[in-house]
Image: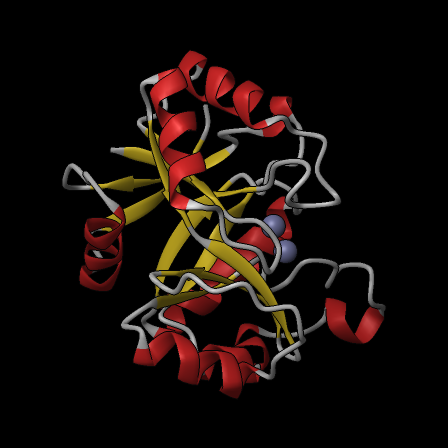
Amino acid sequence: MRIDLHVHTAPRSACSYLDPSELVQRAVQLKLDGICLTEHQVVWDPDDVENLAREGGIKIFRGNEYTTNQGDILVFGFYEDLKDLLTIEQLHEKVKSAGGFMIAAHPFRGFKTFGIGQLQMTVEQACKRRVFEFVDAVEIGNGKVSADENDMARKVAEKLGLAGTGGSDAHRADEIGKWVTDFEKDIRDENELVQELHAGRFAAVKAA
Ligand SMILES: [Zn+2]
Ligand SMILES: [Zn+2]
């Protein structure tokens, strides 16, 4: 079951140009089985999600992307708006007590542009980033970063024994589905999504 785990829509994500109905139409066109709405700091109202899902006949789940002092974290199974910037420890405590799942989003975004020191970062050095002590998985396929940046994330996840997810990070309709996460089982609701994430029964897949 292929789900785009990382999508931003307008107006809930101020940076997005993607109308939710347009998102659903495009996801259906692409034959995705589901999408996750991961707005910045804001969780969708369940009724709104249900209405949107009914429109398109596609599975729609809620997640979230929270910014921390250790970068952006995709969160599933924890449904609270967080207006303030949290440290990774604070977010981890909240999400863990809710039984949720944390993914380091695009952990090496921009590492190619930080300068020569970062360019020569080895996988071993990259593994030492503190964020990896707190997450359950790593986004190894993000539609908005370079192949090298995704590659580094994949190598780090492999070395640390963390599972890898894929998501487009779409902010526009033509960006949807660039990367998805393929789940082994059929997922009917958010609880099952969190369960399957914890079970590690999935793989990141790049669009052909
Ligand atoms: Zn992000
Ligand atoms: Zn994002």
Residue 59 seen in render: yes
Image-based side of 204 in relation to 123, left or right: left
Residue 104, percent from left and from top: 50, 65
- Location of the C terminus (image quadrant): top left
Residue 123's place in the image compared with 80, above or below, is: below
- In this view, the residue farthest toward the front is 47
Residue 136, percent from left and from top: 35, 70
**Viewer-nearest residue: 103 or 127:** 103
The residue that appears at 19% across and 38% down in the rendered structure is: 188
The residue that appears at 65% across and 68% down in the rendered structure is: 83
How did the renderer colour the structure?
A: secondary structure
**Viewer-nearest residue: 45 or 3:** 45
**Viewer-nearest residue: 48 or 109:** 48
Residue 31 seen in render: no
Image-based side of 206 in relation to 59, left or right: right
- In this view, the residue farthest toward the right is 115
The residue that appears at 58% across and 43% down in the rendered structure is: 169
Ligand 1 sits in quadrant: bottom right
Residue 47, percent from left and from top: 39, 38
**Viewer-nearest residue: 73 or 18:** 18
The residue that appears at 47% across and 78% down in the rendered structure is: 132
Residue 149's place in the image compared with 167, above or below, is: below
- Location of the N terminus (image quadrant): top left
